[in-house]
Image (cartoon, rainbow, N blue to C red):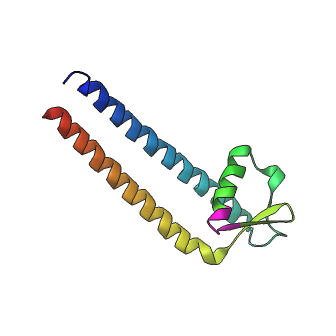
Amino acid sequence: MPGRGLLTAACLVLIALTCISIVRKLERERRLLGQLRARGAHSPETGLGLKDLHEDDRDCLRSLQSAGVVSVSQGRCYLHAASLPPFRRRRFRLALSGGLIALLLAVLIASAILR
């Protein structure tokens, strides 16, 4: 079947790009949570000002806010300490299962090439 190699290469590239995108998102979340933790931002008074954040960090902040880990009040963002451990466990399971699924897909596609 002509073009099978091209299709396989495209699938592998798509898997790699998806993995890179997810890892990049997880790293941005880790970095923002680290900034908030280092600052001791557990209330609006000690929170990090929204004007101090870059556009990528604001996007990440919206994601963390929807996950219930970070709140925004009075133009400042701060952590919910009680919701951090469950969030970390979910994020770890997501990263681990995503990596395993990507590995499985790559093996299946590679085996399809070799057949």
Residue 66, above or below 82: above
The residue at 39%/54% (across/down) is: 98
Q: Nearer the viewer, residue 5 or 37?
A: 5
Q: Quadrant location of residue 87?
A: bottom right
The percent coordinates of residue 52 (x first, y second) are 80, 50
Q: Nearer the viewer, residue 6 or 87?
A: 6
The percent coordinates of residue 99 (x first, y second) are 37, 52
The residue at 48%/67% (across/down) is: 90
Image quarter where the N terminus lies is top left
**Residue closest to the far left:** 115
Q: Is residue 26 left or right of residue 32?
A: left
The residue at 68%/63% (across/down) is: 65
Residue 58, above or below 4: below
Q: Is residue 7 left or right of residue 30?
A: left
**Residue closest to the far front:** 1
**Segment colored magenta:** 65-70
Q: Quadrant location of residue 36?
A: bottom right
The percent coordinates of residue 80 (x first, y second) are 68, 73
Q: Nearer the viewer, residue 16 or 2?
A: 2
The percent coordinates of residue 84 (x first, y second) are 59, 71
Image quarter where the C terminus lies is top left
Asked whether 31 falls inside the magenta stretch, the response is no
**Residue closest to the far bottom:** 82
